Image (tube, rainbow, N blue to C red):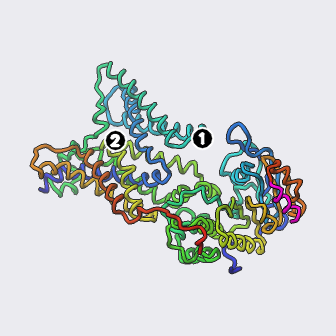
Amino acid sequence: MGQDFVMLSLPPLVIGICAAVACALPGNFLLLRRQALIGDAISHVVLPGIVVGFLVTGVVATWPMMLGAAAAALLAVVLIETIRRLGRIEPGAAMGVVFTAMFAGGVLLLEQSAASGVHLDVQHALYGNLESLIWLDGWGWGALMDAEALRGLPPELPRIGGVMLGVIALTAVMWRALVISTFDEGFARTLGLPTGAIGLGLVAVAAVAAVAAFDAVGSIIVIAMFICPPAAARLMTNRMGWQVAWSVVFACLSAVLGYVLAGYGPLWLGYQNALSAAGMIATVSGAILGLAALFGPCRHRGGAPVENGAI
Amino acid sequence: MGLELVGSETIADASESPLSISGLTVSYGEKPAVFSVDVSFQPGQMTAIVGPNGAGKSTLLKAALGIIRPLSGRVTSYGRPLDEMRARIAYVPQRASVDWDFPARVLDVVMMGLYRELGLLGRMRGQHRARAMACLARVGMEGFANRQIGQLSGGQQQRVFLARALAQGADLYLLDEPFAGVDAATEKAIINVLKDLNAQGRTVIAVHHDLATVPEYFDRLFLINTTAIAEGPMAEVFTPANLQVAYGGRLALAQLGSAAAG
């Protein structure tokens, strides 16, 4: 069990957990700011970014495409903010306008690149390829201490791991400012907080997390992890700190349970095939949200009591 | 209602205006919401900002505080640019401007008033907690510290906002419609707190919509309807003629009568 597990299952599990946590943390704030769709938007706009990254460099390699994706995500974020402010429309509408237009542009660009005879895999972008992120040098648990073997880890792992640690650190340092400006932006301004920069920074962090996660696990997990764990967590508690803690628990649970169910679920039921891990992780996160919506202790909101009953 | 001082003991210099606005114009679209307003609020006074719906009362406050960007205008506080004086200014937004489903307890919201003191990473200590509780006690909400804010009535939510402002220990208090949609007990509690603040020499400026209580609650009046109409002591400004100008004939005779009597 040890060797198989370390070689085949440990890297995808860790990558899945890192991606889920990196997306779920900013997802908490985006959800409360009614910007949860931003994850959806970003995972669509990376398509033109990837195509442009390819067209500019002419090679199918990770870094140019990731940089292209990140640039496209940041451009989309700036466009969304600009349209929202200048047009004075709600964020959801601004996101819808930007991400459909950019995604459509990406499809047209992709056609052009396909015409030149090179194949870019859109399916891969959507479902990711978590199962393929194996560690051939992982000869057993001892390999975790073996520098030589560690060098053979899939490169996605240090990337998404680093991004996750960065997201955790930023969330911790900016915590108070994030909470205040999310709850009451006007009041935050009067405290002297740069609410515009904080909002933009949050979305930029979300964009980086989305691109890194997308590279490792595909966009389905990205979209699910931005929304499902925070939304389920909100139904478990009425305190911001606990909500974020619950969302991390749910994100990890989805990643682990989803991966295991996808790999072994069909076997247990007597089938031979395995299922897409990314699809199953997203499905599990949805199921967790469903359970929280049915049984979560804090699903009854407000219900503000009678006005005259004060004190 | 205790008179104990919570927070900063520094009372503003008697001479400088805590909030002075000149040439302020704000526009949401093509029509200006506030046009070329000049006004200097008097220190140590309670001033009501009054005008019809859509007259730009809230907009004036928000633009003065930099919450929304004005087209033009200069704002100073105690003779300095407003940005340098933020530690001395507390703002109570309209209750409806936030989502009360936010996952926070009453005490969490009041603690937000301590942000300037604590900064991003300052340690929250027992004394901070005690001060936040004292502020809650001043608005009669100490029994609700651990409630989720969505479970409060409108009046209780308004008092929590006021407690948060008290925690800031400011010299200038700006309130946007603090009495809108609150119960009678809350209205009384809030005005008592504001009068206490005023008795300590602090300046209170509030957007207010109920003409019947304006002369009773406030010392001075600023009338606005997109442009500034008048600012001065209540007796001089709260006149049928001025109100007629501000409300453009939309005022019931009874209200004008009360102004004449007041």
Task: Give neighbour class at mark 1: few <14, some 14-19, many 20+ (Cα, 10 Å).
Answer: few
Chief secondary structure of the magenta span? helix
In the rendered image, residue B207 lying in the magenta stretch gets the answer no
Residue A42, relative to residue A270: is it above or below? above
Q: Residue at x 23, y 52 (%)?
A: A147
From the top left corner, tell me how far across and down residue A267 is, in percent: 12, 49
Please name which of the two marks, 2 or 1, marks the residue nearer to the observer. 1
- Percent of width and height locating residue A56: 40, 26
Q: Residues within 10 Å of mark 2 (few under 14, many from 20)?
A: many
What residue type is disc 1 on?
Arg
Tell me, yes or no, if residue A267 can be seen here. yes
Distance, label 2 to label 1, CA atoms, is 29 Å
Q: Chain of mark 1?
A: A
**Is disc 1 on the same chain as disc 2?**
yes
Q: Is residue A87 above or below residue A260?
A: above
Secondary structure state at the residue bearing disc 1: loop
Q: Which residues are magenta?
A: B252-262
- The N terminus of chain A lies in which quarter of the figure? bottom left
Question: Could you tell me which chain the residue with mark 2 belongs to?
Answer: A
Q: Nearer the viewer, residue B115 or B30?
A: B30
- Look at the image and tell me whether residue B22 can be seen: no
Which is more toward the observer, B207 or B63? B207
- Which residue does the numbered mark 2 point to in the structure image? A219
Which numbered disc flags the more N-terminal residue, 2 or 1?
1
Amino acid identity at mark 2: Ser
Identified at 62% across, 65% down, the residue is B158
Q: Is residue B256 magenta?
A: yes
The percent position of residue A93, horizontal first and vertical second, equals 50, 39
Residue position marked by numbered label 1 in the rendering: A88
Q: In this rendering, would B46 be left or right of B168?
A: right
How many discs appear? 2
Percent x, y of residue A304: 53, 65
